[in-house]
Amino acid sequence: MAEMESRLGRVPPERLLEAATRFFEEVESKDRLAVARRFLANPSVHADPAPFLVVESIKNWESLVFVSYTLQRPFIVVAIHKEEKERLAEAARRGDPDDANDAARLRLLERMGTPRLIQAADFVVDTTGCFLVYDSSHRQCHVHLTPTFLQGLSQVLAWILFRGEDELRELIIQAICRLAQDRGFEPVVEVSS
């Protein structure tokens, strides 16, 4: 967003997909590393002593390799998956401005090279069947998780943290509860069988 807005100006949410398409056509299609360079220009990225780096939503293979090489940190690719019908229903319910243009957004991601990253994923975390419902009147949030989701995320974390899967399942649920509480909601977590 920072790199896009530095070149195109402030983008209102309802014009985000249009701006992202324009940014890709004018900048990223000619310089696949533009966003990666912007990310690496932040001194705190280089100063962080962590042995691994978590980068969300990197869009192309070239950027991933460039960031990994520059920071001298290995990468793993984690793909988040949700069954398509459920993903579309969730997008419609959420009502984010770019969700109305889902087909155009998917075409843009294809042009960016995102499917190549997804195909090369070291791990896949399947969120099918998981949902979150906020009850503002009672300040509760109901979190429904599936064993498949917990297993997939536990496998990723086991690789990074070298801990057992059962311990990690509990840590994941605790982290979800803390996040809900930080937002002022009392969590009710349910894991389907």
Image (cartoon, rainbow, N blue to C red):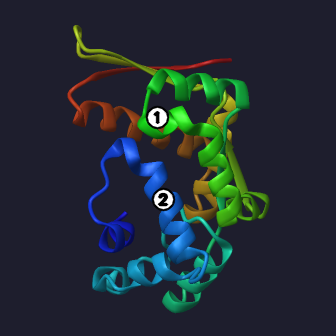
The residue positioned farthest toward the right in the image shown: 119
Res 136 → quadrant: top left
Q: Of discs 2 and 1, which sits in the foreground?
A: 2
**Mark toward the start of the polypeptide (2 vs 1):** 2
Instruction: Name the side, left or right, on which 45 lies relative to 122.
Output: left
Q: In this picture, is 151 found above or below 58?
A: above
Q: Name the outermost residue toward the top.
A: 137
Drawn side of residue 67 relative to residue 106, left or right: left
Q: Residue at x 70, y 33 (%)?
A: 148
Dot 2 amino acid type: Ala
Quarter holding residue 139: top left
> Could you say which disc has been placed on residue 52 in the image?
none
Location of the C terminus (image quadrant): top right
Q: Secondary structure at mark 2?
A: helix
> Looking at the image, can residue 134 be seen?
yes
Question: Percent x, y for residue 109?
Answer: 64, 56
Report which residue position mark 1 lands on: 173
Q: Is residue 58 above or below residue 126?
A: below
Q: Quadrant of the N terminus?
A: bottom left
Q: Is residue 191 left or right of residue 45?
A: right
Q: Nearer the viewer, residue 3 or 131?
A: 3
Residue 144 visible at all: no
Residue at 63% x, 18% y: name it: 192
Q: Residues within 10 Å of mark 2 (few under 14, many from 20)?
A: some
Mark 1: secondary structure: helix
In the displayed structure, 50 sits above or below 98; it is below
Q: From the image, tell me which residue sits under label 2.
A: 20
